[in-house]
Amino acid sequence: MNLVIMRHGQAEARNRSHDSDADRNLTKEGSETLKNFISTIDPWFPKPEKIITSPTRRTQQTAEILCKHLKISPFIVLTDPMILNGSAGEIISFLEDESLPENLWIIGHQPTLGQFLCALIGLDVFKGFQFKPGDCAYVKFPDKPGVNQGRLISYASPDLIERNLHNDL
């Protein structure tokens, strides 16, 4: 099974114009960065058969951009509060109980995603892993996702790709 863990794109700053943190949108720059990033990583990351997002607006917008750019149905996107409120261990338990496709993407938030990745590939969960906006990790499993069962295949970051493009010019 293939799992891609992705942090939502760059979101609006927290301020009083939002009723809650969940209402924050992607910035225009964040949306544009995601579009360019997705086209760059497309050949090296598996196409999602199912996407699970947190219930926040910014994760759902990230999934919408992903579906549109990869020309896949938005009906594969599911929202689950576990991705927002669950711990790394709770998300792993949740996935163990789900019927999962061969290629699953999860779009969520820091620090949970970093702890989740660490648990899956056998790193110290308490140190975590720092996902920046748009970053994604591709992890392969012999079966379902489980603690220390994953093999990190690839990690990509819009920041790294942007820096490499500018260095090549």
Image: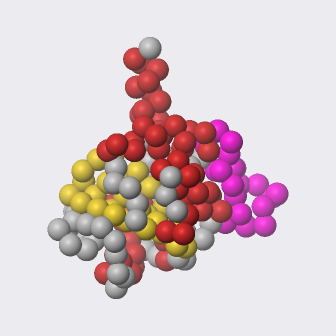
Residue most extreme to the bottom? 97
Which residue is located at x 55 percent, y 73 percent? 79
Q: Quadrant of the C terminus?
A: top left
Residue 108 is situated, as x and y percent measured from the top left of the image, at 50, 62
Which residue is located at x 73 percent, y 67 percent? 20
Residue 121 visible? The answer is no
Residue toward you, 154 or 133: 154
Residue 125 is situated, as x and y percent measured from the top left of the image, at 32, 64
Residue 105 is situated, as x and y percent measured from the top left of the image, at 41, 62
Residue most extreme to the left? 142
Residue 150 visible? The answer is yes
Q: Which residues are magenta?
A: 11-30
Residue 133 is situated, as x and y percent measured from the top left of the image, at 52, 48
Query: Relative to 86, does residue 15 appear above or below in the rendering?
Result: above
Tell me: 42 left or right of 107.
left
Whether 166 is among the magenta residues is no
Tell me: 129 left or right of 110.
left
Which residue is located at x 69 percent, y 50 percent? 12
Residue toward you, 78 or 152: 78
Residue most extreme to the right? 17
Color style of the picture: secondary structure
Q: Quadrant of the N terminus?
A: bottom left
Quadrant of residue 18 in the image? bottom right
Looking at the rendered structure, the number of numbered marks drawn on it comes to: 0
Which residue is located at x 52 percent, y 56 percent? 67
Tell me: 23 left or right of 115.
right
Secondary structure that dominates the magenta span: loop
Whether 26 is among the magenta residues is yes
Residue toward you, 73 or 97: 73
